[in-house]
Image: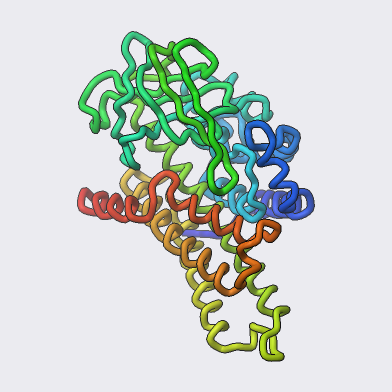
């Protein structure tokens, strides 16, 4: 498998990395996170104009990318700046189920930055199990609850997973439905997350829904969206881990103890080396998952779960080492390190933590 990026993707990487470095410092990020909805609409429009949203969608959907490598380069650049704009919610989790569903008009608006989406799938009792859906769809009416819907409060439309038939944990019988969160039968409670993001809980009581494809055969599309989302989170974590590494190295070169920079102490050098090696291991598995995104289902899902498991473990290691090697400064609001650390911990718990994906990898291995 060739992991060399194409010329177009290298240009996209350089453009986004430079944009984030020059226009998205920590103060800009905090200001955006405090805005109504948790992001800056003007900044979102700039990202869309740069092509960052279109790069996440295939040509068939009006974009110019959509492959695993495109998700990798875009989200790694975003992770390096702790970008809070709704790339994951709108351009990955929300837009993926619309591909091939006859809603090209909505996809065009997404690429232009004018339409916001959110995937309402997780339920209070479902943990991370993808097929555990208790929310019901009967006669085009949705009834049930959804929790931790990322950027749910600012979405123009929700894509809701709901069951038309089968038992609560069956893959068959699940459909995906378009729901207007401002329509009848929808109750929402918005809240902030510990890493500066925003999410919402929804209660549906006979809310009107429009089926996306087969109302009982939506699980493959749901699994695809969640898989692309997990890959995006792994790539974002790589960007955050690289930022933590750079911050820590710079601090160790300048902070002195006993008359010498911290970087001169061999024990601390060993800890930095272990962190760098772990990041490279996470990068390798994430690149493999990106390359396997169009592979047969079991191979694709095994690669995604393997990457998400390792990224979760390495993210925790990098967070802890960054805080410990910095000392007290790493606990201050004005410094970037603690915000990267919180985001890395949150990424582990989104779309399945390391324990869930380890169990899922083993189950897929046994079923192969």
Tell me how the rendering is colored: rainbow
Which residue reaches farthest right?
A: 22
Please state the horizontal and vertical placement of residue 13, each as a whole percent of the image: 67, 53
- Direction from residue 81 to residue 97 in the image, left or right: left
Q: For the point 75% across and 34% down, which residue is it?
A: 42
Count every numbered label the image shows and give the total. Answer: 0
Q: Describe residue 118's horizontal placement relative to residue 265 as left or right.
A: left
Residue appearing at x 60%, y 37% in the figure: 86
Using the image as rendered, state which of residue 184 and residue 368 is in the foreground. Answer: 184
- State the residue in front, 244 or 362: 244
The x and y percentages for residue 1 are 46, 59
Name the side, left or right, on which 11 lies relative to 344.
Answer: right
**Would you place residue 168 above or below residue 27 in this image?**
above
Vertical side of 278 occupied by 309: above or below: above
The residue lying at 47 percent from left, 62 percent from top is 316
Image point (21%, 27%), residue name: 167
Instruction: Kindly indicate the quadrant of the structure image that contains residue 46.
Output: top right
Residue 300, position as x, y percentages in the image: 38, 48
Furthest-bottom residue in this view: 259
Front position in the image: 88 or 330:
330
Residue 239 against residue 173 in the figure, above or below: below
Position in image of residue 349 (x %, y %): 43, 49
Left or right of residue 359: residue 118: right
């Amino acid at each position: 498998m060739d992991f060399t990026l194409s010329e177009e993707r290298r240009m996209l990487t350089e453009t986004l990395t430079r944009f984030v470095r020059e226009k998205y410092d920590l103060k800009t990020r905090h200001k955006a996170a405090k805005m109504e909805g948790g992001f800056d609409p003007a900044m979102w429009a700039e990202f869309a104009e740069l092509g960052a949203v279109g790069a996440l969608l295939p040509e068939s959907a009006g974009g110019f990318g959509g492959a695993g490598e495109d998700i990798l380069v875009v989200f790694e650049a975003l992770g390096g700046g702790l970008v809070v704009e709704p790339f994951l919610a709108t351009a990955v989790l929300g837009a993926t189920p619309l591909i091939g569903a006859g809603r090209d008009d909505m996809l065009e608006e997404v690429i232009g930055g004018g339409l916001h989406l959110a995937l309402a799938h997780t339920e209070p009792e479902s943990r991370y199990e993808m097929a555990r859906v208790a929310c019901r769809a009967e006669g085009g009416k949705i009834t049930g609850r959804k929790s931790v819907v990322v950027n749910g409060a600012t979405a123009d439309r929700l894509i809701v997973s709901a069951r038309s038939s089968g038992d609560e944990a069956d893959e068959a019988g699940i459909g995906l439905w378009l729901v207007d969160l401002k329509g009848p039968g929808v109750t929402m409670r918005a809240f902030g997350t510990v890493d500066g993001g925003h999410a919402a809980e929804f209660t549906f009581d006979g809310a009107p829904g429009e089926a996306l494809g087969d109302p009982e055969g939506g699980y493959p599309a749901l699994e695809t969206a969640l898989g692309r989302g997990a890959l995006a989170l792994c790539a974002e974590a790589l960007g955050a881990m690289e930022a933590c590494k750079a911050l820590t190295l710079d601090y160790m070169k300048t902070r002195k103890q006993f008359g010498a920079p911290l970087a001169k102490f061999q024990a601390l050098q060993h800890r930095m080396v272990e962190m760098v090696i772990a990041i490279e291991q996470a990068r390798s598995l994430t690149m493999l998952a990106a390359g396997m995104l169009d592979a047969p289902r079991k191979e694709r899902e095994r690669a995604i779960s393997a990457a998400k498991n390792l990224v979760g473990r390495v993210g925790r290691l990098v967070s802890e080492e960054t805080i410990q090697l910095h000392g007290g400064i790493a606990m201050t609001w004005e410094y970037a390190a603690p915000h990267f650390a919180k985001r890395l911990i949150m990424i582990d718990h989104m779309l399945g933590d390391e324990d869930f994906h380890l169990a899922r990898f083993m189950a897929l291995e046994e079923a192969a």
